[in-house]
Image: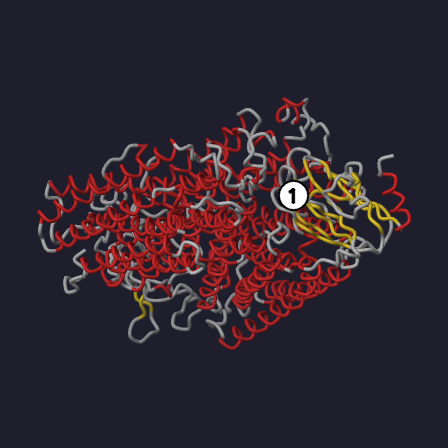
Amino acid sequence: MGGLIQNASTFGPAIDLMFMVVLVMTSVAFVLVEGLLIYFLIRYRARPGQRAVYVHGSRRLELAWTVGTAFALLSLALYQRPTWAEVKQTLPDESTALVIGLSADQFDWDATYPGADGRLDTADDLVAPPNLLYVPVDRPVIVRLQSKDVLHSFFVPQFRLKQDAVPGITIRVWFQATETGEFEIACAELCGLGHYRMRGLVIVESSEAFEARLAELRPK
Amino acid sequence: MAHAVISEPHATPTWQGITTLKFAWWLFLASEVMFFAGLIAAYIVLRAGSPVWPIVSEVLNVPLVAGNTFILIVSSVTMVQAYAGIQAGNQSQLRNMLLATTALGIIFLGIQAFEWSALLREGETAQSSLFGATFYTLTGFHGLHVTGGVVGLVFVTLKAFRAGYTQAEHGGVELMGLYWHFVDVVWIILFTIVYLI
Amino acid sequence: MAHPPAAHRAPYMRVFVFLVVLTVLEVLLAFVLAASPAKVPMLIALAIAKATLVAMYYMHLRFESRLLRAIAVFPLILSIVLALAPSFDVLARR
Amino acid sequence: MTTHTGTATHVTHDHPAAEKSFIQKYVFSIDHKVIGKQFLFSSLFFFVFGGLLAMLIRTQLAWPWQEIPGVGQFVYGNSGNILAPEAYPALVTMHGTIMIFFFIIPILSGAFGNFLIPLMIGAKDMAFPRLNLLSYWFMVPAFFIMLAGFFVEGGTAAAGWTSYVPLSALPDMVPGSGAGQTLWIVSLTLVGTSSLMGAINYITTVVMLRAKGMHMFRLPMTIWALFITAILVLMATPVLTSALILLFLDRTVGTHFFLPSGGGQVILWQHLFWFYSHPAVYIMILPAMGMASDIISCFARKPLFGYKPMVFSIMAIAGLGFIVWGHHMFQSGMNPVLGTVFMTSTMMIALPSAIKTFNWLATLWGGQLRLTAPMLNALAFVSTFVIGGLSGVFAAATPVDIFIHDTYWIVGHIHYVLFGGSLFGVFAAVQYWFPKMFGRMMSDRWGKVHFVLTFVAFNLVFFPMFILGAYGMPRRIADYTSYNFLAPLQSLNQFMTLSAYVLALSQLVLFGNFFYSLFRGQKAADNPWQANSLEWATSSPPPEHNFHAEPVVYHGPYEYSSPEVAEDWLPQNHALDGAGLKKTPTPAAATGAAAD
């Protein structure tokens, strides 16, 4: 093991690094605690005629491990804030980014692209076939996420991106793919009996190929 | 009842003479606070998240309900006077004030029933809007608590008329009072956030 | 149940007058300040004042032990947390 | 709810063993020990039931949509002997609901809370025995209403144990969200009311009915944990009730609290639900922590290290537990700023748990460890709880949570805490207090067999879930094999399923040991473990009002290996004489209640 599956987005490495940092910290704690536990288990087995140490506690020790742990946890809290802010609190500039509408319902993902006017929700919007999301590589993409019925969750593991689609509100999330190829979308929020087959594909292509795709979608 | 459960062996300090039952009663009231907190939080969230909300004073009969609020406050006073009466050993004050409290509680419920039926006739229902849904839920659950209180009051009053409480032993009156004032406090909050804001 | 001591002649009627005055004030403010941003905080402050009066005097919390007061205050703190965090959530979304 | 009579009763201890009918003694008993056992047996039944549902889930995950030889026609007879797609959400929903609301919470608070609180504080019974009776009898209709869901049109609730709206609010979004979902709501409301009555009773009992000399800071950790748990129940459960009522109105009356079609807020449900259910996580673990603390100290023959820090950590967990609920909602569309706030509070709540772990370790240091079956299970509690806690740090780290949220990482995390933590705590507690409950010993050898099998199989089932999570396998999906990135995980899933079968079969050892010992076990002495707390100062099993004479408490519960006495234990009710070197028995001992 060691780390998550392959990454294909710009903020993925930061998340993977966070994962590794937490993994290292928790592994140290894990080895320390379980190691001591096993050592004590063997070292201090009851032996006839011996007596346990009569001690109720130690203020110094309590203080040491309280402060130590608090320091580790607070540093972790501070350390991760920028990454969270980058992924979920900020959006790329809409003038350069591609804005896509993505609507979920039982049990499909439906993507729409701006038409000639460059805006969504107009008559010339381009509608992709169900469960296909075409995006260009190396360009920020803003996904305008909506749901028509129940909760769904837009999850592309290789992009390290997950966001619930909530009926009644529109949530904007973004990503920028770094590799061309096909990546699967899985629904990550129980949405009914077809939850397991609510599978979509993100198809990442070069910008030329992507433009050609859009042209294909235009009504002839 | 009032000598509660302190079976003699438990010589542990019970905090400053609070009886077991009164202590438990306060715990029950605390849980009731959280129940209404859940409903009120839902109301605040729904209202804050709602793009449209009727101008309350145009839909609801605020003067009428202000009067009803006054009635509930008066009933709190009569309740506390009933308690003060039995503390002083005054049985007739206890009985009269309990009767008054019960009557005021019933009047409150009557006015609320009138208010509801008028609203329903105007077509304002729990299904028609979020406003209606939250209004009927909040005032409805408060009304249910008042109803429970009136039923309790009837029992307490009956017991008072059979001389069931004495200057030394009147835990039932105290607990009834605590519950009744709690219902009053909830109404004070509800009146402000539902009718005035 | 021989307490609270009869020593505190609780001012029931004076509290009652306060409650009525505050209620009248509230209803008046609700109409006078109909469009003012000060309306909501002022009305809530008045409601809290009234509720506190009832709890302190009619429910005798003023004369009770700290333990009972803690039982009364703890859920209030939690209620505030419960109401504030989700309303911040929806308000920030709008 | 009338105020003056009926809810509380006197402890009618002055009637010497008036003849009681079978029904008064075993069915509608007001004896806290009998009620505790009623909770114990009914929750063990639901443990088996929820476990069998888990086996069906695991079978589907190993061999999706295959006919199960022999069993298939029995469980899936309506759908051609194989699992129907709509049945899978119902399976996971009922597994979660039953294990949480009908097994873990009732066995910890209901069974052990009821049985232990009066005994360990030196009381004759609960403060309100009749309220206690009522609390159990609110559970019984809840059982049947929940089970009735299996027989209604569309089957049981299928919106997850969290019942997220709108799936749970709209009657036609998933087959089980018809009548089954409504029954689910009604049943949980009853369960909540039952726990609420229990909580009021427990808090009052602990505060008011402690024996003479039993100061708050002489209470065993078990009692502290159950006490704080009861406070959590008292404050959190009513909020769940209010949310359930709103959901019920949405489903039956036609309101739109949670339905955006009428202006409702979807995320509101999650806020209200997790305001209850996050504290509920601690309701499910704190009692196990308390019981493990007592068992570890007893079998290490050493005072619990850092008693007061342990108590304060429980308080801190309970307090912080109310302001971390948002960490279940990082990806829900909740404002990301709130995400940062909840992330910080969540990081802080890891601190008291860490303090507790260090104190358990320090308790072992320098001890004389008696590795009995209950001790091994208590140590397993510590070691698996550590994994559960540490895996939670990943989920608390918001950026990492973006990836692992709603994947098998979370499933692994919750099972390490609830199975690895709470359940090993329950195994330890059942075997530790069995002699006091039933007057007989459970077999230690078979206890160890059960322990080894369970511990190994448990880790083989649940540790791989972290690997599945790192691959991004979402939870609650019936079939992952159609995903290219998940298909390679099938052999690992099959391995986990086989381990799960072993895990389930190992429980037969426990049940065999339990029921054999119930009738044939060796008779237990009053204080078989040479422990200090008050429940061991009476006979096994205790008489109707617990103590033959009023216990008086002179020490804290952890005076093991005290230099003041020759033995390595010093019961709480044994006074030391002026010289401080010799034990003098209390009046209790004179009547034959003392252990030695």
Q: Is residue B10 visible from the viewing direction of this image?
A: no
Residue positioned 66% across, 41% down in the render: A147
Disc 1 marks which residue?
A189
Q: Position of residue D41 (x, y in %)?
A: 45, 39
Q: What subunit carries mark 1?
A: A
* Amino acid at circle 1: Glu
Name the residue nearer the viewer: D484 or D59.
D484
- Find numbered disc 1 in the image and state the secondary structure of the residue it sits on: loop
Q: Is residue A123 visible from the viewing direction of this image?
A: yes
Q: Work out which quarter of the rendered image holds the C terminus of chain D and state it.
A: bottom left
- Residue D29 placement, left or right of D509: left
Q: Work out which quarter of the rendered image holds the N terminus of chain D and state it.
A: top left
Q: Position of residue D264 (x, y in %)?
A: 53, 42
Q: Quadrant of residue D211?
A: bottom left
Q: Position of residue B7 (x, y in %)?
A: 22, 53
Up-down relation of residue D457 to residue A48 (above or below): above
Mark 1: give few (<14), some (14-19) or many (20+) Cα within 10 Å: many
Picture mark count:
1
- Residue D198 placement, left or right of A204: left
Name the residue nearer the viewer: A202 or A192.
A202
- Residue B62 placement, left or right of A37: left
